[in-house]
Amino acid sequence: MGRLIVVSNRVQPPGDTGDGAVGGLAMALAAALREHSGVWFGWSGQTVDEYTGQLSVQRIGGVTVATVDLEEQDRLEYYNGYANRTLWPLFHYRVDLSAYERTFSEGYARVNARFADALTPLVGPDDFIWVHDYHLIPLARELRARGLKNRIGFFLHIPWPARRLLITLPDHRELVAALFDYDLLGFQTEDSTGAFRDYVRTEAEGSIDDEGVAHAFGRSARIGAFPIGLDVENFVAAAEGPVAQAEYERMRASVNGRDMIIGVDRLDYSKGLEDRFLAYEQVLHDHEELREKVFLLQIATPSREEVVAYQEIRARLDAVSGRINGAFATVDWVPIRYVNRTYRRDELAGVYRAARIGLVTPLRDGMNLVAKEYVAAQDPKDPGVLVLSQFAGASEQMAEALIVNPFDRAAVAEGIVKGLGMERAERIERWTALMDNLRKTDVIAWRDAYVAALIG
Ligand code: ADP
Ligand code: G6P
């Protein structure tokens, strides 16, 4: 059997403690490749004056990591442009934020062609290729154009949007048609898979057969939901290790008997942070008895900072957190501790464990690994409560969390209050069910199920 070649825009070498770039994709792929010697190909994150296609190759922990530099124009049109100003907002149901420009499409096509040029010489005849996420939808088409006959699969880490939203994208047909150069299309949820099927049937006038194979644009691709999992064993070990323990003790001392509510997110408008702050404000407003007894620690790492929508959400969060703190803080209590730095994974595990509530309320999210990390980090004898958005992909698998509609401020506030008051027996019961499922559906199971479907 050939090697597994993983391709993604962002590459994070296996063994990285996660104190640099953040995001669910890199975390999961690093874990998925760790026990599977293979190749990970993508963008170095660097730009050069003129594109050369020069590969930088390193061996890290059994994995060959190969990257290319892009040009400044690529970063503007492909990464900041088509990927993060056109597709990301649209696929997260923010048509209002989705901008379409021809130069973005051109940059997207150009970088996918460049990736294909750089990758093709690395591929042996028996290798199988697994392409990740919205940056690289046309990659298979480019690889096929260069003569590759290998099995090629695609996995989308973000939601597949409802048809009526997708058709607002001027080149939606070309984008979807390009997916049919893959052998296997994987989505996070049944919801996304269903939305894709709907597009195939209604918009592309194609069909889905009894085997789950989609036929459209004169070609076929197998489709299915493969919900991504967490590197559970590793995360549990991290939560019980010395760094997490120290961080846990430090947090316990600093919370001073108060209940901590934790939020951890990339600073992204899809994460619903402003609504989350407002729901928490509602709790403080309605429940005088809870003031000074709880606080919210929101860790939000700046992301995609050159894109205006991200600058705007950052400014809004500064303003809203400042206003709430101004209104409710006392001499020795600040209701929201709002932190913009990145944590190491083991530190983060300790922080999660010290929190009574994990507050995960994205307005739309492909999966959301933070929800899973929060659960995995808990003390089995005294676990906290997960309050989870129904619009996170994770909610399809985590029914024992307190599931809330993040657009309903009062409902999120009720979830927080209910979580704070939940008896230990109920917390243990819910947590045990969540944890059993996390173990059964971890990142290794995800990888193995996907790869088996791709090869099979
Ligand atoms: P997304 O992929 O959209 O960022 P996920 O919740 O799936 O959302 O994944 C986020 C990942 O990034 C998680 O593994 C989380 O621990 C990590 N992360 C987010 N913010 C931080 C932070 N401030 N410090 C360290 N890791 C972070
Ligand atoms: C999400 C996307 C990933 C992306 C990550 C971080 O998880 O699905 O493709 O890598 O966010 O975003 P960034 O733009 O920093 O790579």
Image: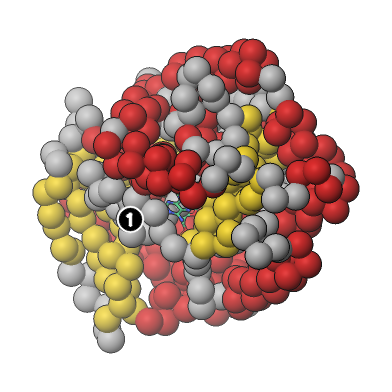
Direction bottom: furthest residue: 49
Give the image's coloring scheme: secondary structure
Residue position for label 1: 19
Left or right for 7, reference 430: left
Q: Residue at x 47, y 78 (%)?
A: 76
Nearer to the camera, 202 or 31: 31
Left or right for 237, reference 423: left
Nearer to the camera, 207 or 380: 380
* Image quarter hosting the N terminus: top left
Nearer to the camera, 285 or 149: 285
Element at badge 1? loop
Residue 357 visible in the displayed image:
yes
Cβ of mark 1 under 8 Å from ligand 1: the answer is yes
Q: Amino acid at mark 1?
A: Asp
**x, y (%) of residue 215?**
61, 34
In this view, 63 is above or below 138: above
Q: Residue at x 64, y 72 (%)?
A: 318
Quarter residue 118 falls in: bottom left
* Image quarter hosting the C terminus: top left
**x, y (%) of residue 109?**
46, 67
Quarter residue 387 falls in: top right
Q: Residue at x 77, y 31 (%)?
A: 418
In this view, 189 is above or below 359: above
Number of numbered discs visible in the structure rendering: 1
Left or right for 256, reference 360: left
Q: Residue at x 22, y 31 (%)?
A: 36
Quarter residue 233 falls in: top left
Crowd around label 1: few <14 · some 14–19 · many ≥20 (10 Å): few
Residue 148 visible in the displayed image:
no
Direction front: furthest residue: 331
